[in-house]
């Protein structure tokens, strides 16, 4: 799995993400519903949310790990 810190792991868990085993694409965690949201960290790149819409189209957003941790803190 891509190296991520304990604060980020805890935040992802609090937000309801399931952890993935990690692969060459740097997939860390995902949450499934009508859409699928994955947190990925490709080698040499920044963290990204990949949102897959019901029709299969994707939107990709760069995200800072501090944003995720802060969001989880506000949910509690």
Image (cartoon, rainbow, N blue to C red):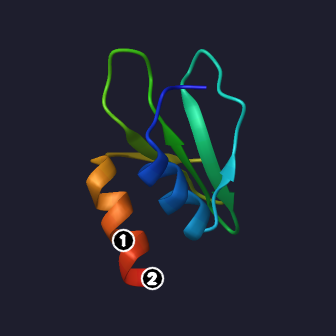
Q: Count numbered badges in the picture.
A: 2
Q: Can residue 17 be seen in this view?
A: yes
Q: Estimate how packed mark 1 is, as few (under 14), some (14 to 19) or many (20 or more) residues with alpha carbons within 10 Å.
A: some
Q: Where is residue 61 in the image (x, y as percent from the top left)?
A: 34, 47
Label 1: which secondary element: helix
Q: In this view, does 38 lie above or below 36?
A: above
Q: In this view, does 39 lie above or below 15?
A: above
Q: Which residue corresponds to mark 2? A: 75
Q: In which quarter of the image is residue 14?
A: bottom right
Q: Is residue 19 above or below residue 45?
A: below
Q: Position of residue 34 (x, y in %)?
A: 68, 68
For the point 32% across and 23% down, the residue is 45
Q: Which residue corresponds to mark 1? A: 71
Residue 46 lies left or right of residue 53; in this view the side is left
Q: Where is residue 11 in the image (x, y as percent from the top left)?
A: 48, 61
Label 2: which secondary element: helix
Give me the C-alpha separation between circle 2 and circle 1: 6 Å
For the point 63% across and 62% down, the residue is 35
Residue 53 lies left or right of residue 70; in this view the side is right
Which residue is outermost to the front? 6
Q: In which quarter of the image is residue 15?
A: bottom right
For the point 43% across and 53% down, the residue is 7
For the point 53% across and 58% down, the residue is 10
Residues at marks 2 and 1 touching, judged by CB atoms closer than 8 Å: yes
Q: Estimate how packed mark 2 is, as few (under 14), some (14 to 19) or many (20 or more) residues with alpha carbons within 10 Å.
A: few
Q: Where is residue 27 in the image (x, y as percent from the top left)?
A: 58, 32
User: Between 54 and 37, which is closer to the camera in this rendering?
Assistant: 37
- Quadrant where the N terminus lies? top right
Residue 22 shows which numbered tag? Answer: none
Q: Is residue 55 visible?
A: no
């Amino acid at each position: 799995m891509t190296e991520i810190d304990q604060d980020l792991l805890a935040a992802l868990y609090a937000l309801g993400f399931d952890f993935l085993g990690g692969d060459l694409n740097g997939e860390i965690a995902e949450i499934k519903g009508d859409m699928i949201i994955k947190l990925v960290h490709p080698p040499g790149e920044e963290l990204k949310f990949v949102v897959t819409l019901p029709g299969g189209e994707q939107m990709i957003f760069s995200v800072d790990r501090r944003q995720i941790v802060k969001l989880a803190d506000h949910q509690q």
